Amino acid sequence: MHQPVLLQQTIEYLLTDPNGVYVDCTLGGGGHLSHLLNFTGNNAQIIAIDRDKEVLEASRKKLNLPKITFIHEDFRYLSRILNRLNINKVSGILLDLGVSSMQLDTASRGFSYHEDAPLDMRMDSEQALNATEIVNHYSEEEIARIIYHYGEERYARNIARSIVKYRQAKAIDSTLELVDIIKSSVPARYSREKHPARRTFQALRIAVNSELEAVQEVLPQAVKHLLIGGRLCVITFHSLEDRIVKQFMQEQARECICPPDFPVCICGHRASLKLLNRKPMLPDENECHQNPRARSAKLRVAERI
Protein backbone atom coordinates (compact mmCIF):
# COMPACT_ATOMS: atom_id res chain seq x y z
CA MET A 1 0.00 0.00 0.00
CA HIS A 2 1.31 3.44 -0.95
CA GLN A 3 2.13 5.68 2.03
CA PRO A 4 3.93 8.94 1.22
CA VAL A 5 6.80 9.66 3.59
CA LEU A 6 7.35 12.93 5.47
CA LEU A 7 4.06 14.10 3.98
CA GLN A 8 3.17 17.09 6.17
CA GLN A 9 6.71 18.49 6.28
CA THR A 10 7.18 18.16 2.53
CA ILE A 11 4.00 19.98 1.54
CA GLU A 12 4.46 22.70 4.18
CA TYR A 13 7.85 23.54 2.71
CA LEU A 14 6.91 23.04 -0.94
CA LEU A 15 3.85 25.30 -1.00
CA THR A 16 4.65 29.01 -1.33
CA ASP A 17 1.82 30.16 -3.61
CA PRO A 18 -1.61 28.46 -3.61
CA ASN A 19 -2.02 29.39 -7.28
CA GLY A 20 1.52 28.65 -8.37
CA VAL A 21 2.97 26.08 -10.75
CA TYR A 22 4.36 22.94 -9.09
CA VAL A 23 6.27 19.98 -10.47
CA ASP A 24 6.07 16.53 -8.90
CA CYS A 25 8.98 14.83 -10.65
CA THR A 26 8.22 11.45 -9.08
CA LEU A 27 4.46 11.05 -9.04
CA GLY A 28 4.38 7.40 -7.97
CA GLY A 29 1.16 6.61 -6.13
CA GLY A 30 0.30 10.30 -5.95
CA GLY A 31 0.41 10.57 -2.17
CA HIS A 32 2.26 13.87 -1.96
CA LEU A 33 0.33 15.31 -4.89
CA SER A 34 -3.02 14.38 -3.33
CA HIS A 35 -2.10 16.30 -0.18
CA LEU A 36 -0.77 19.27 -2.17
CA LEU A 37 -4.11 19.53 -3.98
CA ASN A 38 -5.80 20.30 -0.65
CA PHE A 39 -3.89 23.58 -0.41
CA THR A 40 -3.85 24.80 -4.01
CA GLY A 41 -6.28 27.25 -5.61
CA ASN A 42 -8.28 26.99 -8.80
CA ASN A 43 -5.54 28.68 -10.81
CA ALA A 44 -2.76 26.40 -9.68
CA GLN A 45 -1.04 24.21 -12.25
CA ILE A 46 0.67 20.92 -11.42
CA ILE A 47 2.99 18.92 -13.64
CA ALA A 48 3.04 15.26 -12.58
CA ILE A 49 5.95 13.26 -14.02
CA ASP A 50 6.78 9.57 -13.80
CA ARG A 51 8.93 7.35 -16.00
CA ASP A 52 6.81 4.33 -15.04
CA LYS A 53 3.83 4.25 -17.38
CA GLU A 54 1.83 1.75 -15.29
CA VAL A 55 2.23 3.83 -12.14
CA LEU A 56 1.44 7.06 -13.99
CA GLU A 57 -1.78 5.68 -15.45
CA ALA A 58 -2.90 4.29 -12.08
CA SER A 59 -2.42 7.70 -10.47
CA ARG A 60 -4.07 9.48 -13.40
CA LYS A 61 -7.25 7.50 -12.77
CA LYS A 62 -7.30 8.66 -9.14
CA LEU A 63 -6.26 12.27 -9.71
CA ASN A 64 -7.58 13.23 -13.13
CA LEU A 65 -8.18 16.95 -12.54
CA PRO A 66 -7.89 19.82 -15.08
CA LYS A 67 -5.10 21.50 -13.08
CA ILE A 68 -2.83 18.43 -13.40
CA THR A 69 -0.79 17.64 -16.49
CA PHE A 70 0.50 14.04 -16.50
CA ILE A 71 3.80 13.38 -18.25
CA HIS A 72 5.32 9.95 -18.97
CA GLU A 73 9.01 10.84 -18.96
CA ASP A 74 12.24 10.55 -16.99
CA PHE A 75 12.64 13.56 -14.70
CA ARG A 76 16.23 13.96 -15.90
CA TYR A 77 14.66 15.72 -18.91
CA LEU A 78 12.90 18.33 -16.75
CA SER A 79 13.89 21.32 -18.88
CA ARG A 80 12.70 19.61 -22.05
CA ILE A 81 9.37 18.79 -20.41
CA LEU A 82 8.78 22.34 -19.18
CA ASN A 83 9.87 23.87 -22.48
CA ARG A 84 7.42 21.63 -24.30
CA LEU A 85 4.67 22.95 -22.01
CA ASN A 86 5.82 26.58 -22.50
CA ILE A 87 6.60 26.85 -18.79
CA ASN A 88 9.74 28.71 -17.75
CA LYS A 89 9.49 29.27 -13.99
CA VAL A 90 7.71 27.30 -11.27
CA SER A 91 6.94 27.79 -7.57
CA GLY A 92 8.10 24.41 -6.32
CA ILE A 93 9.68 21.14 -7.38
CA LEU A 94 9.43 17.82 -5.53
CA LEU A 95 11.72 14.82 -5.97
CA ASP A 96 10.83 11.70 -3.97
CA LEU A 97 13.69 9.47 -5.06
CA GLY A 98 14.08 5.71 -5.29
CA VAL A 99 11.63 2.93 -5.98
CA SER A 100 7.94 3.52 -5.26
CA SER A 101 5.74 1.39 -3.02
CA MET A 102 3.60 0.50 -6.03
CA GLN A 103 6.66 -0.91 -7.80
CA LEU A 104 7.83 -2.84 -4.73
CA ASP A 105 4.37 -4.26 -4.12
CA THR A 106 3.97 -5.50 -7.71
CA ALA A 107 5.98 -8.72 -7.59
CA SER A 108 6.10 -9.11 -11.36
CA ARG A 109 8.23 -5.96 -11.69
CA GLY A 110 11.17 -7.79 -10.09
CA PHE A 111 12.11 -5.14 -7.50
CA SER A 112 11.39 -7.26 -4.44
CA TYR A 113 13.71 -9.93 -3.04
CA HIS A 114 10.86 -11.46 -1.05
CA GLU A 115 8.79 -12.83 -3.94
CA ASP A 116 9.70 -14.80 -7.05
CA ALA A 117 9.41 -12.92 -10.32
CA PRO A 118 11.31 -12.25 -13.55
CA LEU A 119 14.53 -10.38 -12.82
CA ASP A 120 13.51 -7.06 -14.35
CA MET A 121 13.78 -3.92 -12.14
CA ARG A 122 13.00 -1.44 -14.92
CA MET A 123 11.10 1.66 -13.82
CA ASP A 124 10.35 2.29 -17.48
CA SER A 125 9.27 -1.01 -19.00
CA GLU A 126 9.92 0.38 -22.47
CA GLN A 127 13.69 0.65 -21.97
CA ALA A 128 15.96 -2.17 -23.14
CA LEU A 129 18.30 -2.73 -20.19
CA ASN A 130 17.04 -4.83 -17.30
CA ALA A 131 18.62 -6.70 -14.38
CA THR A 132 18.64 -10.01 -16.25
CA GLU A 133 20.93 -8.48 -18.87
CA ILE A 134 23.38 -7.28 -16.22
CA VAL A 135 23.70 -10.51 -14.23
CA ASN A 136 23.89 -12.75 -17.31
CA HIS A 137 26.09 -10.71 -19.64
CA TYR A 138 28.22 -8.20 -17.73
CA SER A 139 31.75 -9.16 -16.73
CA GLU A 140 32.55 -10.28 -13.20
CA GLU A 141 34.53 -7.08 -12.66
CA GLU A 142 31.66 -4.85 -13.80
CA ILE A 143 29.09 -6.72 -11.70
CA ALA A 144 31.35 -6.42 -8.66
CA ARG A 145 31.79 -2.70 -9.33
CA ILE A 146 28.04 -2.13 -9.57
CA ILE A 147 27.28 -4.06 -6.38
CA TYR A 148 30.09 -2.39 -4.44
CA HIS A 149 29.56 1.21 -5.57
CA TYR A 150 25.77 1.28 -5.84
CA GLY A 151 24.98 -1.15 -3.02
CA GLU A 152 27.93 -0.43 -0.73
CA GLU A 153 28.08 -4.20 -0.36
CA ARG A 154 31.19 -5.53 1.41
CA TYR A 155 30.83 -8.97 -0.21
CA ALA A 156 30.49 -7.60 -3.74
CA ARG A 157 33.38 -9.62 -5.17
CA ASN A 158 32.11 -12.87 -3.65
CA ILE A 159 28.61 -12.26 -5.00
CA ALA A 160 29.86 -11.31 -8.48
CA ARG A 161 32.07 -14.41 -8.58
CA SER A 162 29.13 -16.64 -7.63
CA ILE A 163 26.86 -15.02 -10.22
CA VAL A 164 29.35 -15.62 -13.03
CA LYS A 165 30.01 -19.21 -11.91
CA TYR A 166 26.26 -19.98 -11.70
CA ARG A 167 25.40 -18.53 -15.11
CA GLN A 168 27.94 -20.77 -16.83
CA ALA A 169 25.52 -23.64 -16.27
CA LYS A 170 22.22 -21.77 -16.44
CA ALA A 171 20.94 -18.25 -17.09
CA ILE A 172 19.73 -16.37 -14.02
CA ASP A 173 16.10 -15.55 -14.71
CA SER A 174 14.29 -14.89 -11.44
CA THR A 175 14.57 -12.80 -8.29
CA LEU A 176 14.64 -15.70 -5.84
CA GLU A 177 17.19 -17.52 -7.99
CA LEU A 178 19.47 -14.51 -7.54
CA VAL A 179 18.64 -14.34 -3.82
CA ASP A 180 19.82 -17.94 -3.39
CA ILE A 181 23.08 -17.14 -5.20
CA ILE A 182 23.64 -14.14 -2.93
CA LYS A 183 22.90 -16.16 0.22
CA SER A 184 25.47 -18.75 -0.82
CA SER A 185 28.08 -16.01 -1.24
CA VAL A 186 27.95 -14.37 2.19
CA PRO A 187 28.56 -15.65 5.75
CA ALA A 188 25.58 -17.05 7.62
CA ARG A 189 25.83 -14.31 10.26
CA TYR A 190 25.36 -11.69 7.53
CA SER A 191 21.97 -13.19 6.69
CA ARG A 192 20.90 -12.84 10.32
CA GLU A 193 21.57 -9.07 10.42
CA LYS A 194 19.34 -7.88 7.54
CA HIS A 195 18.25 -9.50 4.32
CA PRO A 196 21.49 -10.44 2.52
CA ALA A 197 20.11 -9.47 -0.92
CA ARG A 198 19.01 -5.95 -0.08
CA ARG A 199 22.22 -4.18 -1.09
CA THR A 200 22.69 -6.17 -4.30
CA PHE A 201 19.09 -5.55 -5.37
CA GLN A 202 19.49 -1.85 -4.63
CA ALA A 203 22.68 -1.76 -6.70
CA LEU A 204 21.15 -3.53 -9.69
CA ARG A 205 18.08 -1.30 -9.59
CA ILE A 206 20.21 1.84 -9.53
CA ALA A 207 22.32 0.57 -12.43
CA VAL A 208 19.34 -0.52 -14.53
CA ASN A 209 17.60 2.84 -14.13
CA SER A 210 20.67 5.14 -14.07
CA GLU A 211 19.23 6.63 -10.90
CA LEU A 212 22.25 8.54 -9.65
CA GLU A 213 23.00 10.04 -13.05
CA ALA A 214 19.37 11.19 -13.29
CA VAL A 215 19.60 12.96 -9.92
CA GLN A 216 22.85 14.67 -10.90
CA GLU A 217 21.29 15.87 -14.15
CA VAL A 218 17.97 17.12 -12.78
CA LEU A 219 19.20 19.23 -9.84
CA PRO A 220 20.76 22.06 -11.91
CA GLN A 221 17.67 22.10 -14.12
CA ALA A 222 15.44 22.39 -11.06
CA VAL A 223 17.32 25.45 -9.82
CA LYS A 224 17.16 27.02 -13.28
CA HIS A 225 13.37 26.75 -13.40
CA LEU A 226 12.53 27.89 -9.85
CA LEU A 227 11.10 31.33 -9.28
CA ILE A 228 12.87 33.50 -6.71
CA GLY A 229 11.45 32.20 -3.43
CA GLY A 230 10.49 28.89 -5.02
CA ARG A 231 11.35 25.70 -3.17
CA LEU A 232 13.16 22.49 -4.08
CA CYS A 233 12.20 19.55 -1.84
CA VAL A 234 14.13 16.29 -2.20
CA ILE A 235 13.43 13.06 -0.31
CA THR A 236 16.22 10.48 -0.39
CA PHE A 237 16.39 6.92 0.91
CA HIS A 238 20.05 5.94 0.83
CA SER A 239 23.42 7.58 1.36
CA LEU A 240 24.45 7.63 -2.31
CA GLU A 241 21.62 9.81 -3.56
CA ASP A 242 21.53 11.84 -0.33
CA ARG A 243 25.22 12.68 -0.72
CA ILE A 244 24.59 14.00 -4.24
CA VAL A 245 21.68 16.18 -3.07
CA LYS A 246 23.49 17.42 0.05
CA GLN A 247 26.66 18.40 -1.83
CA PHE A 248 24.72 20.08 -4.63
CA MET A 249 22.58 22.16 -2.27
CA GLN A 250 25.55 23.15 -0.11
CA GLU A 251 27.56 24.21 -3.16
CA GLN A 252 24.69 26.24 -4.59
CA ALA A 253 24.19 27.94 -1.22
CA ARG A 254 27.81 29.19 -1.12
CA GLU A 255 29.03 32.46 -2.58
CA CYS A 256 32.47 31.06 -3.32
CA ILE A 257 33.44 27.53 -4.36
CA CYS A 258 37.19 28.12 -4.71
CA PRO A 259 39.49 25.67 -2.91
CA PRO A 260 39.89 26.72 0.75
CA ASP A 261 43.62 27.43 0.33
CA PHE A 262 43.01 30.13 -2.32
CA PRO A 263 43.86 33.57 -0.83
CA VAL A 264 41.19 35.37 -2.90
CA CYS A 265 38.05 34.29 -4.75
CA ILE A 266 38.51 33.79 -8.48
CA CYS A 267 35.49 31.55 -9.23
CA GLY A 268 32.88 34.28 -9.58
CA HIS A 269 30.26 31.86 -8.22
CA ARG A 270 27.16 33.34 -6.64
CA ALA A 271 24.75 31.49 -4.39
CA SER A 272 21.50 30.45 -6.09
CA LEU A 273 19.94 28.61 -3.15
CA LYS A 274 19.31 29.17 0.55
CA LEU A 275 19.23 26.04 2.71
CA LEU A 276 16.04 25.89 4.76
CA ASN A 277 17.25 22.99 6.88
CA ARG A 278 20.93 22.55 7.68
CA LYS A 279 20.26 18.97 8.68
CA PRO A 280 17.76 16.78 6.84
CA MET A 281 14.31 16.24 8.32
CA LEU A 282 13.66 12.66 9.39
CA PRO A 283 10.43 10.73 10.05
CA ASP A 284 9.47 10.42 13.71
CA GLU A 285 9.03 7.12 15.53
CA ASN A 286 5.29 7.09 14.93
CA GLU A 287 5.67 7.39 11.15
CA CYS A 288 8.38 4.71 11.10
CA HIS A 289 6.11 2.40 13.08
CA GLN A 290 3.19 2.95 10.69
CA ASN A 291 5.37 2.82 7.57
CA PRO A 292 8.66 0.90 8.04
CA ARG A 293 9.81 1.97 4.55
CA ALA A 294 10.08 5.53 5.87
CA ARG A 295 12.94 4.68 8.26
CA SER A 296 15.72 5.69 5.90
CA ALA A 297 13.97 8.76 4.42
CA LYS A 298 15.58 12.21 4.58
CA LEU A 299 14.04 15.47 3.42
CA ARG A 300 16.27 18.34 2.27
CA VAL A 301 14.81 21.71 1.27
CA ALA A 302 16.33 24.73 -0.43
CA GLU A 303 14.87 28.04 -1.61
CA ARG A 304 15.81 29.90 -4.79
CA ILE A 305 17.41 33.27 -4.17
Image (tube, rainbow, N blue to C red):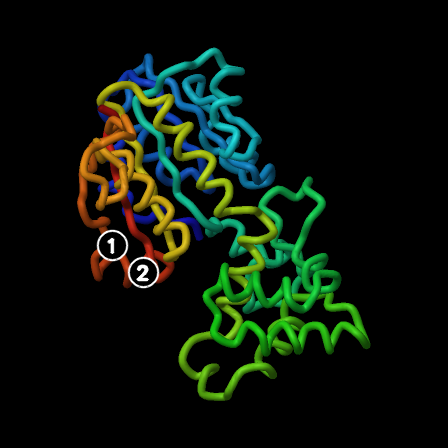
Considering only vertical position in the picture, is 165 above or below 248? below
Farthest bottom residue in view: 188
- Looking at the image, which residue is at 49% across and 31% down? 49
Please give the label number shown on residue 6: none
In the image, 227 versus 25, the foreground residue is 227
Please give the label number shown on residue 283: 1
Q: What element carries label 2?
A: loop
Considering only vertical position in the picture, is 236 above or below 303? below
Residue type for callout 2: Arg
Do the numbered discs 1 and 2 sit on residues whose CB atoms are within 8 Å?
yes
In the image, 206 versus 98, the foreground residue is 206
Badge 1 crowding class, 10 Å Cα cut-off, few under 14, some 14 to 19, many 20 or more, is: some
Badge 2 crowding class, 10 Å Cα cut-off, few under 14, some 14 to 19, many 20 or more, is: some
- Looking at the image, which residue is at 56% across and 31% down? 73
Please give the label number shown on residue 295: 2
Q: Report x, y in % for residue 171.
A: 78, 68
- Looking at the image, which residue is at 19% across and 49% down? 279
Q: In which quarter of the image is residue 238?
A: bottom left
Residue type for callout 1: Pro
Quadrant into which the C terminus falls: top left
How far separated are the C-alphas under marks 1 and 2?
A: 7 Å
Q: Report x, y in % for residue 138.
A: 70, 61
Q: Is mark 1 on a helix, strand or loop?
A: loop
